[in-house]
Image (tube, rainbow, N blue to C red):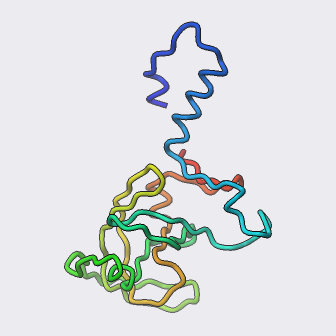
Amino acid sequence: MKILNKAHVPDKISVNHLEKIANKIFKVNRVTFSDDELPVEGTEHNRALYLTVKCEDSVVTRVLVDNGSSANICPLSMLNKLKVDDDRIHKNSICVRGFDGEDKDSVGDIILELTIGPVEFTMEFQVLDVVVSYNLLLGRPWIHAAKVIPSTLHQMVKV
């Protein structure tokens, strides 16, 4: 909105042209999904939402977005694949409870640089020594930092 408020708009611009310009500005800060990316069963599926992101200069697939998680989670095995130095892990005494009710002590926390679409994030992750189906889990800390809301239109819109 700041950009739109400060933008110089020529007097003789058509509403159509102005709308196209505004849409381009808004598209820069959102991650969207097209119908091509839907599974065979279309919008009726109930599969998890996975993203592909850039993390620490590497492409990471199977990044789970989970609005039910109160923490961002990074498995220790993923840090090893990324060749992240263990010295970057800050020891802590956090215990993470999984959806199955099991408690797991955190190895520590780490700050990771992520690029999702055109947006860069510096996020804290709890490092867990676990075997899971995802490579990273983005929970509510990322969702709130990114100011995104899940939408029924297969997009996450920055508000």
Q: Residue at x 56, y 27 (%)?
A: 21
The quadrant of the rendering that contains the C terminus is top right
- Toward the left, the furthest residue is 87
Q: Position of residue 105 (x, y in %)?
A: 38, 89
Observer-nearest of 30 and 102: 30
Q: Residue at x 45, y 21 (%)?
A: 7
Q: Position of residue 30 (x, y in %)?
A: 54, 48
- Toward the top, the furthest residue is 11
Q: Position of residue 109 (x, y in %)?
A: 31, 76
Would residue 72 be found to the left or right of residue 87 on screen? right
Would residue 65 be found to the left or right of residue 96 on screen? right
Q: Position of residue 116 (x, y in %)?
A: 46, 57
Give the number of marks. 0
Q: Residue at x 48, y 68 (%)?
A: 138
Question: Residue 57 is drawn in which quadrant?
Answer: bottom left
Would residue 86 be found to the left or right of residue 30 on screen? left
Instruction: Tell me: residue 25, above or below residue 4.
Output: below
Question: Residue 149 is drawn in which quadrant?
Answer: bottom right
Instruction: Tell me: residue 30, above or below residue 89.
Output: above
Instruction: Tell me: residue 98, above or below residue 144.
Output: below
Question: Residue 141 is drawn in which quadrant?
Answer: bottom left
Q: Residue at x 50, y 45 (%)?
A: 29
